[in-house]
Image: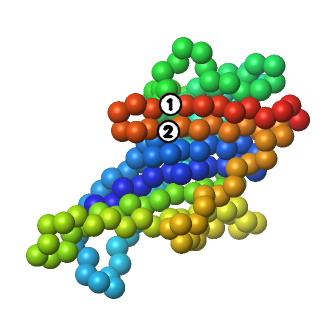
Amino acid sequence: MVKCFTNKVVFQDKNTLELDRFVRIKEYNVQDVRRGETFVADCNFAWSLWMNQTDGFLLLGGGTAGEKQMGIPLTVKDGLPMLFPGAPLPAMIQPDFNGYPYSEVTGIDGSFVVSYTWPFSWIPQETVIHVIAERTSDGLKWRVVPRDEPTIPDGPHAGGWKLTARSNGEAWGVELTRGTKP
C-alpha cells in the first residue's frame, strides 16, 4: 500500500503551507513487487493558493471552478491574511476563480509511505520515500532526498505568512503565523 503525504508547499517564494500528516492525499495498492522491481507512484502533492486584496483560499490540488473541493478559506485584515472566522477547517469550498490570482508554487516537499509485508511474514514493514520539488526555469523539478533530510525551508516572512496544520488522527488544529507588511 502507498500513502501520499504533503509536508510543505511554498508559494511565490514567500507564503508557506506546512502540513504535519494533516491529510493523506491518496492511498492505493500496487501489485506485488519483487526486489529491484519498480512501480508507478501516483501522488499529487500540490495545493494551490488563490488570493486577492480582501480574501482567498488554499485548495487541495489545482482547483476546478464550480466543483466542491477541500480547502482552507482565508480573509485579509489590515493587509495580512488570517483564517476565515467561524469557517470549518478544512472546509468544502466551491471556488469561483474570478478576481483571485493564482500564486505560483515554488517548492513542494512530500512523502510516499510504502507499507508491505515479506512473503511468509505477517509483520508489516514501512518505508518512507522523501521527495522535494523546486522551481527552476524549466518548471518544478523533483528529486528523491534522504529520509532524514529536513523539509524545504519556509518562504521568507517579510510580506508572507505560514499556515501550519497538524493532526494526531483524531483531532487537528490550524495555526497562521503572519509576517510583516511588505
Q: How would you rate the neighbour count of disc 2 (Cα within 10 Å): few for under 14, some for 14-19, many for 20 or more? A: some
Q: If the image is split into quadrants, where does the N terminus sit?
A: bottom left
Side of 81 relative to 163 (left or right): right
Residue 143 seen in this snapshot: yes
Q: What residue sits 79% from the left and 47% below the top?
A: 156
> Residue 173 shows which numbered tag?
1
Q: Position of residue 49 (x, y in %)?
A: 64, 39
Residue labelled with disc 2 = 166
Circle 1 Cα neighbour tier, 10 Å, few/some/many (<14 / 14–19 / ≥20) = few
Residue at the far top in the pictured view: 86
- Identify the residue at horizontal 69%, vertical 47% (top origin): 11
Residue found farthest to the bottom: 36
Q: Is residue 113 above or below residue 48?
A: below
Secondary structure of the residue carrying tag 2 is strand
Mark 1: which amino acid?
Answer: Gly
Q: Position of residue 105 (x, y in %)?
A: 67, 51
Residue situated in front as seen by the camera: 65 or 105: 105
Q: Are marks 2 and 1 in contact (CB under 8 Å)?
A: yes
Residue name at image x 62 percent, y 42 percent: 17
Quarter where residue 39 is shown? bottom left
Q: Quadrant of the C terminus?
A: top right
- Compare residues 10 and 98 and report the one nearer the observer: 10
Amino acid tagged 2: Arg
Dot 2 or dot 1: first in sequence order is 2
The front one of 25 and 116 is 116
Residue farthest to the right?
182
Q: How many marks?
A: 2
Badge 1 element: strand
Residue 68 is left or right of residue 141, and the answer is left
Residue 97 in sight in this render: no
**x then y, percent, for residue 178:** 74, 32
